[in-house]
Image (cartoon, rainbow, N blue to C red):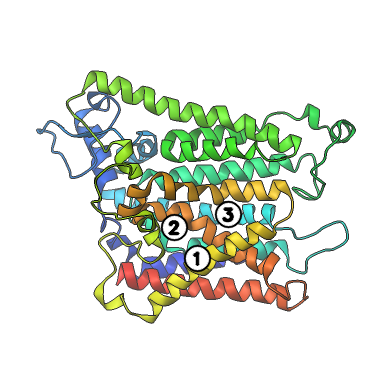
Amino acid sequence: MAVLVLTAMTDWRLIDSGLSDHLFDFGDEALNAVRAWDDHGFWSMAGLFPWGGYIPPETTPTAIYQSKTPVHLLHLWAAFKLVGLEGFTNFKLVYSLMVVSLNGVLLGCIAKLCFPLRGPHWVSPIPGNLVFLSTYAITISNEAMLRFCLVDEPDYLGMTFWLATIVALGHWLKRYDPKETNERDNNYTEQDQASTGISQLKNPKVAIGLGFMSSWIYPILGVINLIALFLLQLFPVTKPLQKGIRALMPGALAGIALYWIHRVIAKQIIPEKLIGSELMYRMGLTTNIEGHDGIFDAIDFLYDQRSGGIPSFLRNSQIRIEHIAIWILGFNLFFIVFAKLKGINRQSLLVLSAGSSWLFVPLLTQSLAMHGWVYGIHFMPSVVLGWVGGCTTVFPGRQSQVFGPGTLGFCALLIWVIQMRWFLVAYLS
């Protein structure tokens, strides 16, 4: 009930403040792309699409974007055919808010999986439902998450599928230890495995499918996730976790491979029409310094995620300082929580859901520096889980019957108010 009330309050304030009038403030590329498919044919562009302004039916598309897969637009194309141009705005409004809420649910589930609320000899006074609700509140009011309503980049849908992958993996891991994701010691014996049925455990099929879709929708994220999955195997992970990680890797690789196969085929069919930046340029490994000087330009999403820059009347405002503080403190808390968290399963789930995104900073410096308003979504889980993890595992008094739950609930409410205020003023005023 509390989740429904919070969702209704959040969506009401956004809609009442004119969100529907601002849905295309930062571009209508996705709408134009599906209109191009409708007007010129899906296969005439080798299954890819133009990314920019509207192309009339009488004009032949000459610039087809090769750096994105069509998967993240197929459902929008179906919606466009169903509701038409007139109804697309209403569809986008409802669909975007549903995806925002879905991410809140997924991160709420991840928080309950990662942060210990009970152990062999203790039980936390913080209820699991409060952990879920607090995570949900911070997520659905986050600037990077709410910006999904205003932009159509594949990062968002790719992240949603990846968070769903981690939730599925976490619940699959609980099948061998229903009390907690990781209460046991990391040293498993053959007898332990036999007694818990680990050797008979089937592959996490749901997680495999979701991970594949995440990688196919957004191949760059797939590469980052594949690197994280590979690196985790170098640590002393439990046998079930190792099995789950290895099961996810082929799906992630398959999504990336499908994208490149598609791109190679398109290059053979319409080579003169394809556009898109080279990988080395995106990584910042060229002589060009346009848009970015150094590595720290890649984290300017900390203080500026708005495409076109922060409005002048907000640059020195108190609300902006409060908003930046939430992000910076959230990141600091995330790494503190990660350092203090016990249990290799919990640590691994935290890495896969939030920590691995930090690989974007050294590997795609130029992209982050020039497109902070896009890549901010990848660091949103770090902020959210940092605050919730801080209240449940780091802050003093967390074992108090009153102070522990009170601190988590108050922090979540305070952050929800600050983040909502910032988004309403910065984007909808």
In the rendered structure, which amino acid carries the disc numbered 2? Met
In the rendered structure, which amino acid carries the disc numbered 1? Ala
Foreground pick, 207 / 276: 276
Q: SS for tag 1?
A: helix
Report the residue at 49% width, 26% height from top: 254
Side of 425 relative to 113 (left or right) = left
Res. 145 mark:
2
Q: Are marks 2 and 3 in contact (CB under 8 Å)?
A: no
Q: What residue would you read off at disc 3?
A: 107
Percent x, y of residue 121: 88, 60
Percent x, y of residue 159: 48, 46
Percent x, y of residue 408: 64, 71
Marked residue nearer the N-terminal end (2 or 1) = 1
In the rendered structure, which amino acid carries the disc numbered 3? Leu
Q: SS for tag 2?
A: helix
Q: What residue would you read off at disc 1?
A: 8
Foreground pick, 427 / 265: 265
Which of labels 3 and 1 is toward the front? Answer: 3
How many numbered marks appear? 3
Res. 235 mark:
none
Q: CA distance from mark 2 to mark 1?
A: 17 Å
Report the residue at 43% width, 70% height from top: 324
Q: Is residue 214 above or below residue 427?
A: above
Q: CA distance from mark 2 to mark 3?
A: 12 Å
Q: Is residue 279 above or below residue 151?
A: above
Marked residue nearer the N-terminal end (2 or 3) = 3
